[in-house]
């Protein structure tokens, strides 16, 4: 009997369930957003993934055997234009995050769509580049150079494509009002991923394309 | 039941109130105009990188390109990803990942005599 008296909750006492019932905010031990912390940890681990792929390429870039090598293939003006497109997509992404923080849904949708289009243009450029290389005799298994090059740039291209899917999903969710909780944080998380994809390309562009083999 | 936060950027991240949250963000972080200026500077730096790659700088070519690449990397992480204004915990988590990657693969490349000319 006495146990029931001790454990019975006071119905007027606020329930500490980790949620702010007005803003759905999580209380965390660090005072920081767990979602954002998880995203930064994910990006930190992605550094190791791309570090491995870039290092492998650097080791094998001179191992083209009798096939075509990087110096005969690279079209620097074309790749520079692709790099510029991806860089500008980072600008439009950050403008989308900024608009989301101002709670300007219309501009957020516009900038997210422009970012996805620029990302699509970059991927299209990469597909074109791969097609040209293949026609010039550089298949995936032609040499250690070709395998490491296609793996590195292909992985990056997949990351960009995943980013485009996330951006378009965000636009759809904004249109239908299906984003729960803080919209700007959700958009900021996709933004962090997108900028990460951009900084990886900054490294690939310099190490793979600009520094001579 | 409210979150305890120290900086305006963290408050804005976690959904501070609609009116003041955005204003605080603008005043503590970067404005849209500044983002555009940063992007233009990055574009100019990219063009400079390409121009440098065509120059005959000899032994200075690779270090020059690496420094320009690092400037672009840090600028995007610091301003576009807001890490410059964010919590030290986020900074630690990301830069530890970058540092581990550089050290680990630096050792790997050294082991395979990559730096031997």
Image (tube, helix red, strand yellow):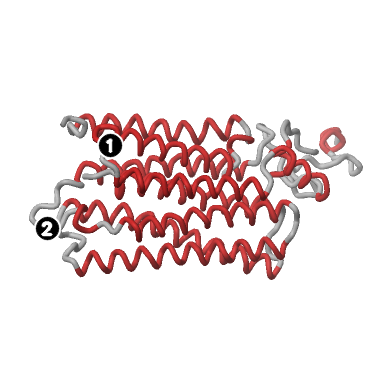
Q: Is residue A120 above or below residue A36?
A: below
* Point 75% across, 56% down: residue: A103
Q: Check disc 1 and report the residue beneath it.
A: B57
Q: What element carries label 1?
A: loop
Tell me if mark 1 has few (under 14), some (14-19) or many (20+) residues whose alpha carbon lies within 10 angstroms of its own. few
Q: What percent of the width, then of the height, locates residue B81?
A: 57, 44
Q: Distance between the residues labelled 1 and 2?
A: 28 Å
Q: Check disc 2 and report the residue beneath it.
A: A67
Q: What percent of the width, then of the height, locates residue B20?
A: 82, 45
Tell me if mark 2 has few (under 14), some (14-19) or many (20+) residues whose alpha carbon lies within 10 angstroms of its own. some
Which labelled disc corresponds to residue A29? none
Residue mark closest to the camera, 1 vs 2? 1
Q: In which quarter of the image is residue B90?
A: top right
Q: Is mark 2 on a helix, strand or loop?
A: loop
Q: What percent of the width, then of the height, locates residue B63?
A: 33, 33
Question: Nearest the camera: A154 or A93?
Answer: A93
Q: Quadrant of residue A18?
A: top right
User: Hey, which residue is sitting farthest left in the picture?
Assistant: A66
Q: Is residue A184 above or below residue B114?
A: below
In the figure, is residue A170 to the left or right of B3?
left
In the figure, is residue A156 to the left or right of B79?
left
Parent chain of label 1: B
In the figure, is residue B76 to the left or right of A145?
right
């Amino acid at each position: 009997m006495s146990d029931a008296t001790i454990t019975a909750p006071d119905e007027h006492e606020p329930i500490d369930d980790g949620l702010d019932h007005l803003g759905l905010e999580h209380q965390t031990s660090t005072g920081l957003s767990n979602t954002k912390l998880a995203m930064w940890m994910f990006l930190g681990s992605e550094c190791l993934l791309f570090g491995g792929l870039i290092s492998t390429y650097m080791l094998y870039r001179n191992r083209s055997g009798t096939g075509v090598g990087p110096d005969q293939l690279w079209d620097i003006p074309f790749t520079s234009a692709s790099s510029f497109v991806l860089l500008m997509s980072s600008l439009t992404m950050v403008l989308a995050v900024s608009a989301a923080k101002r709670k300007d849904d219309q501009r957020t949708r516009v900038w997210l769509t422009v970012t996805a289009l620029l990302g699509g243009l970059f991927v299209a450029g990469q597909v074109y580049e791969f097609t040209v290389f293949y026609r010039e005799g550089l298949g995936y298994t032609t040499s250690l150079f070709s395998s490491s090059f296609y793996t590195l740039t292909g992985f990056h291209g997949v990351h960009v494509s995943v980013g485009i899917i996330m951006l378009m999903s965000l636009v759809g969710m904004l249109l239908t009002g299906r984003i729960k909780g803080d919209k700007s944080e959700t958009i900021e998380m996709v933004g962090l991923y997108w900028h990460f994809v951009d900084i990886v390309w900054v490294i690939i562009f310099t190490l793979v394309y600009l520094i001579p083999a | 039941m409210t979150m305890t936060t120290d900086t305006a950027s963290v408050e804005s991240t976690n959904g501070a109130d609609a009116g003041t949250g955005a204003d605080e963000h603008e005043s503590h972080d970067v404005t849209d105009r500044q983002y555009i200026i940063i992007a233009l500077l990055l574009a100019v730096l990219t063009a400079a990188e390409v121009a440098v790659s065509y120059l005959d700088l000899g032994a200075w070519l690779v270090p020059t390109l690496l420094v320009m690449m690092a400037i672009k990397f840090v600028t995007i992480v610091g301003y576009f990803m807001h890490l410059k204004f964010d919590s030290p915990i986020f900074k630690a988590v990301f830069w530890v990942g970058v540092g581990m990657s550089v050290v680990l693969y630096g050792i790997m490349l050294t082991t395979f005599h990559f730096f031997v000319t």
